[in-house]
Image (cartoon, rainbow, N blue to C red):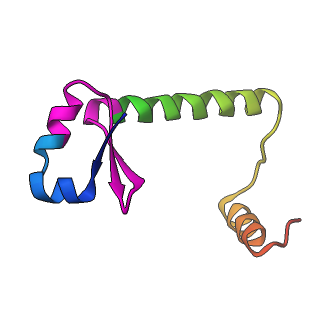
Amino acid sequence: MNIITANDLRTRGLSDIERILQDETEVVISVGGRPRYVVIDIARYDHLRECEIHSAWQQASVDLAAGDYRRENVDEHIARIRNEISGEVH
């Protein structure tokens, strides 16, 4: 994992990020000596999003098969979410 500082990014711009991404899949940008951001190229980002969507779809399929879901209209759903947020779980 390659780490560049925010100061390096300010002085050298994107050239360091582009150079590192030629050989690595991600670049970590540190701020104040601590890792703060991760930069990846758009193809990797798209792949990770697809993996998230696939995982959510699989979990939803498992929940549906197990009967772990609710049937409610929009108003009921909004009321339930508001109650859960306020701590009034019914």
Magenta span: 17-44
Residue at x-position 11% and y-position 57%: 11
Q: Is residue 53 left or right of residue 67?
A: left
- The answer to whether 57 is drawn above or below residue 16 in the figure is above
Up the image or down, 88 lies above or below 23; here it is below
Is 66 part of what is drawn in magenta?
A: no
Q: Residue at x 71, y 61 (%)?
A: 77
Residue 64, position as x, y percentages in the image? 74, 32
- Camera-side residue of 82 and 21: 21
Quadrant (top left/top right/bottom left/bottom right) for the N terminus:
top left
Q: Is residue 64 left or right of residue 50?
A: right
The one nearer the camera, 44 or 57, is 44
Residue 14: x and y in percent read 13, 47
Near-viewer residue (15 or 75)? 15
- Give the number of marks: 0
Quadrant in the rendering for residue 36: bottom left
Q: Position of residue 3 (x, y in %)?
A: 32, 43
Nearest to the observer: residue 22 or residue 45: 22
Q: Is residue 34 magenta?
A: yes
Picture quadrant where residue 76 is located = bottom right
Q: Residue at x 16, y 59 (%)?
A: 10
**Which residue appears farthest toward the right when viewing the image?**
90
Residue in view at x 16 percent, y 37 percent: 18
| Percent coordinates x, y for residue 2 in the rendering | 32, 36
